[in-house]
Image (spheres, helix red, strand yellow):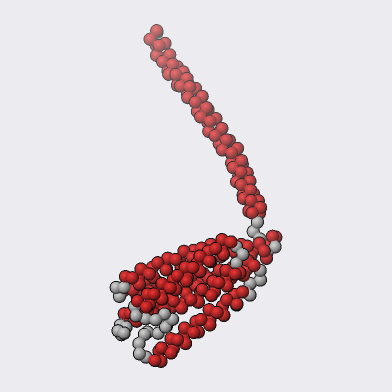
Amino acid sequence: MAEVQEREGKLIQYLNEAYGKEQELVTALQAHISMTSRDAYKKRLKDHLKETRAQAKGLERRIKQLGGKAEKMDLPGPDAVSSVAGKAQGAAQKAVAAAKGPIHMVRGTGEAEKMLKNAKTEFWNEADEIANYLAIEALAEAVGDKDTAKLAREFRRQEERMAKFLERTIATLTKEVVRDEIPPSQRKSNGGTRRRASASKSRTSSSSSRAKPAAAASRSKAASSSKSAAKAKPAARAKKSTTASTKRKPAKSRASK
């Protein structure tokens, strides 16, 4: 068997890290599915469990194509110490995955609370997986491995879609916890919001009502001023005409003498 080069060795290392994570999540997802009562949430978890298993198989297949072996967390080679360490790490990961299922079964105070804690854990795991695939994709592109880059990109997008679903689910489940565990008097009620909005609208209407008479008075005053000015103009012209006529009369009298 040909010796694995540094390029393939680093790719195999990163792929194995992602592979170990996917295997761990298979066990955790199975436990979460059994705890979930919401139909839409349960269905999405089942779908993602299928995706996770398919991802693990895809990673295992790519590792073998590169000359490595799945579950070995070290760089392949003749180093026996590294080989033993890799096997020990793989066994430890299996034990952690098996232990997480029962632990997740007892978390939370109520049904919604348990599902919420599971969703937060799943969201954290999705972020971890996305980081793994981002690193694999960047590494593969840097060393010219288009096939590995394509595989990592595809799996990363699947994890990102799941993360978006969980983001919405976390918000929904948190609201359910509020309804289940917090008295109505301590919640933000829609009625209170409507009352505040109504009061605000009333104040605005009142201010507007007070402003209207003032505006009307202002307009009335302006109209009155305009009328007074209009009346004053003919009077001024009449006065001017009378003055001119008076001035002309003496001249006429001198002419007659």
Q: Residue 35's image quarter?
A: bottom right
Q: Quadrant of the N terminus?
A: bottom left
Q: Residue at x 37, y 91 (%)?
A: 79
Q: Is residue 217 above or below residue 45?
A: above
Q: Residue at x 47, y 24 (%)?
A: 233
Q: Quadrant of the C terminus?
A: top left
Q: Is residue 113 visible?
A: yes
Q: Residue 70's image quarter?
A: bottom left
Q: Residue furthest front?
A: 1
Q: Is residue 205 above or below residue 187?
A: above
User: Horizontal placement of 223 versus 11: left or right?
Assistant: right
Q: Position of residue 36 (x, y in %)?
A: 60, 67
Q: Residue at x 37, y 78 (%)?
A: 64
For the residue pair 104 and 201, the one nearer the viewer reads as 104
For the residue pair 135 and 69, the one nearer the viewer reads as 69
Q: Position of residue 18 (x, y in %)?
A: 43, 76
User: Horizontal placement of 185 versus 35: left or right?
Assistant: right
Q: Is residue 130 visible?
A: no
